[in-house]
Image (spheres, helix red, strand yellow):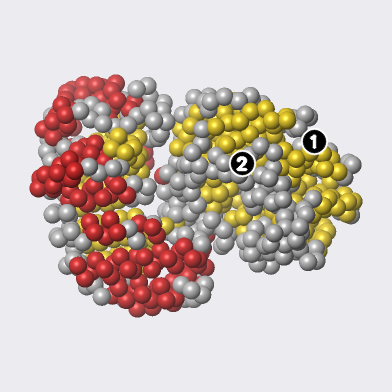
């Protein structure tokens, strides 16, 4: 067999192109012997360690192959839930490793297990810090991710122990206590004299106290600052006061997520413009940049097209142009509409119109996600809506996923292939939200919005036909729900009525009225009641009486009844009568969910509690206390033994359905908005305003995967397919993502 000999130039080109893709580089090097020697240099440039056993094995490996030691330039320590005592890796100093690597310049520490149960707060003792200071003097670049520190002082001492540090990257840093004492201020002044940090990059979800501490110790040396800011942080007097003390700063980059709400987005732009303008008068800035990141470029373009953004964008452009070096970057991280090619669509783009001068100067860059992005290789990010997702549900047969947005658009997805099947407009622009409901045989989809209910027929091939429609005059339809046997279709309206329709002919059978007092207007305003969510549990009983416009899922639909004191109403559909009112909460109920057998009900409330009810006796069974903020979502496990809750306190909790203390608690960096059990009960998914979806094992609470497709957008909607094959989510930027559960678990 004849082999072709590769030239040195070809080998160098292939290896260099694959240098940032280690799995591919390893595969190619093993296939082609000629690539192995040079590939080895890249393979050992960055090495990773996950536990102490790997650390010891690596030390022995390097002792046997001393020629590899000079190749290592970066070490990554990462903890995982799959490794016992993994977190102790971050609390010890690997002296044998540090003394063997003469060219080590970069150090990364990341907590991939994301254990936020209060068990692991990093706090190094003086002896450990002294060793760190002694053996890390040659390390100039430090990156830390998803770490929790006992306090700001512990955080600052850890960073300062890297005495030769010039560059620091922080992301998801949690500080347990944030207070500043006179002793800490003195320590900060002393550390500022020793600090050599010149480049600081602060990514998402770093507490403001941690940012302030870093600016305090680096104010004499910092030359480049990259900072993710929210609208509140851009107006922070503390950050402004600290930033103006950065006497050496000449490059400032402010990064902001693309908020889908016009008012919030405009305020963020105004805040960043004001931040830049103020600091440019106080500091000798030579370069300022703006970074906007999100998962949907077209949602950003639609946002910039709206009236009200022009003046804020003009002000930001003027501030940028006043500095010698300036640029703007729009980075699409996930899969929304940003996955659509930009070529041929730039001519009429709102981005070009809002920043005309910057565009002409070539100072605006749009960065789309790479199709081979290994960070998201285990998931499928699909093209979504151009407006916030208002409803997302999976058909009972697991074949279809339906999503709806505030512009009235509905998309039908093929759940098994995670691709778009059909897209159409159901109603005009919806001011509040759209409700969707699948029939139990998955052959019909009901959509409600504004004054119209439409029933759509879904064919086997995904074709969609308009089957029937119902117009409601003088009121707005808020919700729709099919009974489990498809015998009835219920719709709730803002005039405090529930209309019960025949499940096949869609003829009105009866109207339930339960509000007293003045009637609200068509938008739902006024002292009366509006039906917002309805829930069938066994085809006979209908639950109503929730004051929040939130859906629990596609099956149960709750309704608002302000004349009831924070209670839910349970109706007998067959008799057309009110059976009882479930009272007990001391504040508004946000959502509710029945167990699989329809015998138990869980209600979540603004009073920070979850209550469990016996439906047959219409009696309370248990009160679940432990959240420190309003509870936004609740769900039963498939066997009905556990209850899952989501809260504004940034946690999701698992409780015994019989009552008692929570068994697991999962923490996010912002409100947890939706929670779901998988169909087999083995996994738990959470969706949060911190732009992530996270998957946990139900048995031990361990994190399986953190998913980032919706970067830059609040994630409000979450659904497992009943067959347990896929996990779906929808966000405020219009993006919808579907993933095969097996790919996430095996990754």
Between 370 and 586, the one nearer to me in the picture: 586
Residue 239 percent across, percent down from the top left: 28, 56
Residue 595 percent across, percent down from the top left: 69, 32
Where is residue 268, by image quadrant? bottom left
703 relative to 610 in the view: left or right: left
Residue drawn at x 25%, y 25% is 55
Residue drawn at x 26%, y 50% is 212
Mark 2 and mark 1 in contact? Answer it, CB < 8 Å: no
- Whether residue 387 is visible here, answered yes or no, is yes
Residue drawn at x 30%, y 51% is 202
Q: Is residue 507 above or below residue 36?
A: below
Q: Secondary structure at mark 1?
A: loop
61 relative to 709 in the view: left or right: left
Q: Which residue is mark 2?
A: 586
- Whether residue 680 is visible here, answered yes or no, is no
307 relative to 514 in the view: left or right: left
Q: Distance of mark 2 from mark 1, alpha carbons?
A: 28 Å
Q: Which residue is mark 1?
A: 538
Q: What is the crowding at mark 1: few (fewer than 14 residues within 10 Å), some, or many (at least 20)?
A: some
Where is residue 154, by image quadrant? top left
Residue 431 percent across, percent down from the top left: 64, 64
Q: Is residue 619 above or below residue 590?
A: above
């Amino acid at each position: 067999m004849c082999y072709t000999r590769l030239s040195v130039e070809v080998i160098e080109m292939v290896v260099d192109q694959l240098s940032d893709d280690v799995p591919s580089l390893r595969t190619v090097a093993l296939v082609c012997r000629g690539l192995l020697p040079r590939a080895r240099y890249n393979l050992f440039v960055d090495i990773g360690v996950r536990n102490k056993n790997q650390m010891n094995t690596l030390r022995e490996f390097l002792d046997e192959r001393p020629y590899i030691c000079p190749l290592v330039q970066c070490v990554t320590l990462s903890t995982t839930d799959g490794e016992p005592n993994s977190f102790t890796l971050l609390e010890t100093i690997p002296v044998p490793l540090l003394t063997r690597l003469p060219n080590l310049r970069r150090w990364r520490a990341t907590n991939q297990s994301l254990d936020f149960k209060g068990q692991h707060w990093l706090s190094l003792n003086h002896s450990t810090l002294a060793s760190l200071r002694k053996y890390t003097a040659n390390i100039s670049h430090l990156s830390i991710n998803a770490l929790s520190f006992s306090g700001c002082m512990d955080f600052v001492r850890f960073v300062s122990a890297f005495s030769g540090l010039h560059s620091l990257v922080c992301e998801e840093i949690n500080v347990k206590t944030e207070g500043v004492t006179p002793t800490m201020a003195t320590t900060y002044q002393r550390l500022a004299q020793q600090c050599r940090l010149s480049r600081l990059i602060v990514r998402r979800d770093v507490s403001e106290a941690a940012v302030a501490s870093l600016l305090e110790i680096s104010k004499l040396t910092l030359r480049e600052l990259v900072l993710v800011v929210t609208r509140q942080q851009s107006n922070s007097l503390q950050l402004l006061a600290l930033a103006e003390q950065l006497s050496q700063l000449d490059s400032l980059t402010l990064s902001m997520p693309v908020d889908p709400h016009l008012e919030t987005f405009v305020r963020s732009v105004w805040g960043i413009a004001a931040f830049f303008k103020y600091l440019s008068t106080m500091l000798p800035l030579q370069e300022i940049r703006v970074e906007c990141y999100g998962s949907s470029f077209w949602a950003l373009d639609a946002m910039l097209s709206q009236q009200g953004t022009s003046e804020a964008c003009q002000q930001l452009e003027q501030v940028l142009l006043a500095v010698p070096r300036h640029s703007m970057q729009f980075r699409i991280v996930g899969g929304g509409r940003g996955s659509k090619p930009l070529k041929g669509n730039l001519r009429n783009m709102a981005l070009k119109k809002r920043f005309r001068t910057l565009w002409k100067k070539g100072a605006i860059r749009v960065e789309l996600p790479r199709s081979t992005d290994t960070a998201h290789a285990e998931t499928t990010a699909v093209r979504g809506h151009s407006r916030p997702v208002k409803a997302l549900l999976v058909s009972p047969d697991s074949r279809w996923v339906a999503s709806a947005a505030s512009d009235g658009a509905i998309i039908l997805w093929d759940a098994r292939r995670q691709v778009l099947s059909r897209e159409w407009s159901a109603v005009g622009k919806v001011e509040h939200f759209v409700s969707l409901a699948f029939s139990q045989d998955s052959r019909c989809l009901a959509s409600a919005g504004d004054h119209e209910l439409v029933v759509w027929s879904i064919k086997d091939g995904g074709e969609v036909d308009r089957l029937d429609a119902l117009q409601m005059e003088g009121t707005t339809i808020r919700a729709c729900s099919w009974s489990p046997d498809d015998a009835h279709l219920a719709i709730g309206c803002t005039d405090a009525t529930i209309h019960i329709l025949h499940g096949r002919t869609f003829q009105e059978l009866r109207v339930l009225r339960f509000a007293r007092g003045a009637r609200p207007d068509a938008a739902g305003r006024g002292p009366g009641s509006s039906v917002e969510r309805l829930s069938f549990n066994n085809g006979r009983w209908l639950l109503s009486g929730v004051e929040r416009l939130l859906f629990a899922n596609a099956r149960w639909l709750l309704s608002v009844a302000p004349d009831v004191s924070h209670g839910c109403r349970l109706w007998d559909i067959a008799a057309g009568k009110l059976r009882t009112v479930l009272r007990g909460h001391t504040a508004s109920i946000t959502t509710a969910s029945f167990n699989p057998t329809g015998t138990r009900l869980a209600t979540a409330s603004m009073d920070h509690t979850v209550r469990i009810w016996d439906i047959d006796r219409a009696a309370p069974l248990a009160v679940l206390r432990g959240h420190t903020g309003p509870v936004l979502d609740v769900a039963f496990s498939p066997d009905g033994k556990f209850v899952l809750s989501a809260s504004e306190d940034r946690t999701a909790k698992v409780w015994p359905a019989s009552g008692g203390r929570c068994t697991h608690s999962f923490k996010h960096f912002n409100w947890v908005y939706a929670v779901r059990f998988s169909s087999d009960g083995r996994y738990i998914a959470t969706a949060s305003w911190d732009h992530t979806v996270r998957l946990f094992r139900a048995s031990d609470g361990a994190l399986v995967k953190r998913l980032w497709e919706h970067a830059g957008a609040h994630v409000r909607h979450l659904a497992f397919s009943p067959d347990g094959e896929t996990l779906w989510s929808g966000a405020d930027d219009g993006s919808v993502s579907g993933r095969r559960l097996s790919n996430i678990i095996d990754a």
